[in-house]
Image (spheres, helix red, strand yellow):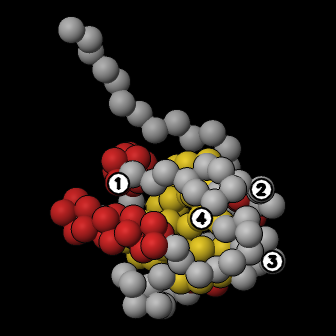
Amino acid sequence: MYAYKIQLVKETRRDYPDCSINNPELAAKLAAQYIGLSDREICVVMAVDTQNKITGIHTLSIGCLDASIIHPREVFKFAILSNACSIILVHNHPSGNLEPSHADIKVTKRIKEASEIIGIELHDHIIINYEGQYTSLKEQGII
């Protein structure tokens, strides 16, 4: 039998604006700075506190050209360890197409269900492209 120590390790400090994230445009802009111009799908989760301020960001998955794996277990591991009140998922579409795929919608609904059970709200799931444009699945009524 092993004993384990669980801790969250802060790697680098990023200066996020000290303001509430009250629209998907600001969240998309911050995520785009973090993800950059990747040629592969990258999915990140942002931890949000009770005042809707981002307290941290974590890379969940680095996929291939048109897919990445997102599992609720990995999403909420970071959310719980960072004491998040809510989370924002963001991933890029290297193709530039902002339409959510069937897989995007399916995983969003699965994360939403898990968020209701765990008690950490899924605030939004945003798709970004290399041109700085975005689609909010919350604005589309999927969440």
Which one is in front, 56 or 73? 73
Identify which amino acid the numbered label 4 is placed on. Answer: His
Q: Residues within 10 Å of mark 1 (few under 14, many from 20)?
A: some
Label for residue 131? 3
Identify which amino acid the numbered label 3 is placed on. Answer: Glu
Q: Earlier in the sequence, mark 3 or mark 1?
A: 1
Indicate left or right for 127 with 48 as reference: right
Which quarter of the figure is the C terminus placed in? bottom left
Q: Earlier in the sequence, mark 3 or mark 2?
A: 2
Provide residue 137's location: percent of width, then percent of height. Answer: 48, 82
Q: Earlier in the sequence, mark 3 or mark 4?
A: 4
Q: Secondary structure at mark 3?
A: loop
Q: Is residue 28 visible?
A: no
2 and 4 marks in contact (CB < 8 Å) = no
Q: Is residue 76 above or below residue 129?
A: above
Q: Earlier in the sequence, mark 2 or mark 4?
A: 2
Give the total of numbered labels. 4
Provide residue 40's location: percent of width, then percent of height. Answer: 71, 54
For the residues labelled 3 and 4, the Cα–Cα distance comes to 14 Å
For the residues labelled 3 and 2, the Cα–Cα distance comes to 13 Å
